[in-house]
Amino acid sequence: MARTMSITRDRRICMGAGALLVGLIAVLAGNASAPELAERLAERAQVAIEQAGGGGAVEAEFVSPWGAPGRHPLLIGGNELGEGVRDRVAKAVSAVPGIGGVRWSDGSALVEATQVPANPLHCQEDVEALLRARTIRFEEGSARIDAASRDLVAEVARALRPCLGSIIAITGHTDASGPEPGNLELSRERAEAVRRALLDRGIPDDGLRVRGVGSRSPVEGLERTDPANRRIEFSVIATEPISPTPVDTPGPR
């Protein structure tokens, strides 16, 4: 009886040692191939980055926070890119087979699945509050934004950021001091200049619409020739539904 128990105990010890050895071999084999896997994924990620418009500006580093190679990339750079481009880059990388969760080195890793679209009316009220006391000004007879108004444009961009997912109309107005064909052209050029300035500050191009109306819509109570009619107005004219984002899908920041 004692001999039987001893044999059973020895068998269990051998089986445990064998399982430990198999596990150790698997770990060593995985570590040995991890650098090769990370290198292959990095090559595929770079192709995806270039196709999404981030070539030369964004790099994908497949190293974990503790320095081990892995399949979860860290996207580095791209600070000068707009939010729309960064979003496309991150999603393109995450779509590469074999790649896990993507994170940016300078911002948030994921878009929350419970994100709720902002109320577009609230966004418009915030912008109107900014422009109630100040005006985006331009150099005389030009579509070049005055240097003193650049900070205001940056504030408008921040106020519009919660409206992403909506269609935002940028309307340029002039006074009636010149011929109307020229006023129409100048008003549109000024609206276009504001659009470019917003793009530079991270507002995606696909949600912006530009138009110029010349002097035909003066401020209520003002003469059409009053210089105060020279202005830019913003309108949130539509809201597009935002689909829930899978937990492993990266956001732009």
Image: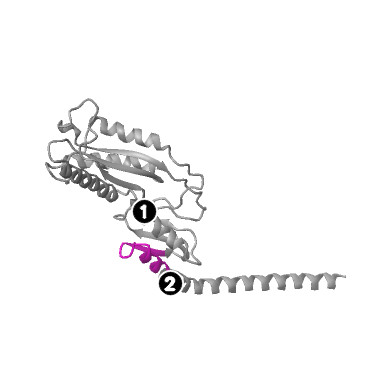
Instruction: Report if residue 54 lies within the magenta region.
Output: yes
Q: Amino acid at mark 2?
A: Glu
Q: Residue at x 42, y 67 (%)?
A: 45
Task: Of the two numbered discs 1 and 2 on the same chain, state the one appearing first in sequence.
Answer: 2
Name the residue nearer the viewer: 18 or 54.
Answer: 54
Q: Which mark is residue 57?
A: none
Measured as percent of width and height from the top left, residue 111 is found at: 46, 49
Residue 145 visible in this rendered orientation of the protein: no
Q: Where the N terminus falls, by quadrant? A: bottom right
Q: Which mark is residue 39?
A: 2
Instruction: Report if residue 215 lies within the magenta region.
Output: no
Q: Give the quadrant of residue 237.
A: top left
Measured as percent of width and height from the top left, residue 166 is found at: 40, 44
Circle 2 — which element? helix
Measured as percent of width and height from the top left, residue 129 is found at: 30, 31
Q: Residue at x 43, y 72 (%)?
A: 39
Label 2 packing within 10 angstroms: few (<14), some (14-19), many (20+): some
Circle 1 — which element? helix
Q: Give the quadrant of residue 18.
A: bottom right
Q: Are marks 1 and 2 in contact (CB under 8 Å)?
A: no
Q: Which mark is residue 84?
A: 1
Q: Which residues are magenta?
A: 44-61
Give above or below for 172 relative to 97: above
Q: Residue at x 42, y 50 (%)?
A: 108
Q: Residue at x 31, y 55 (%)?
A: 81
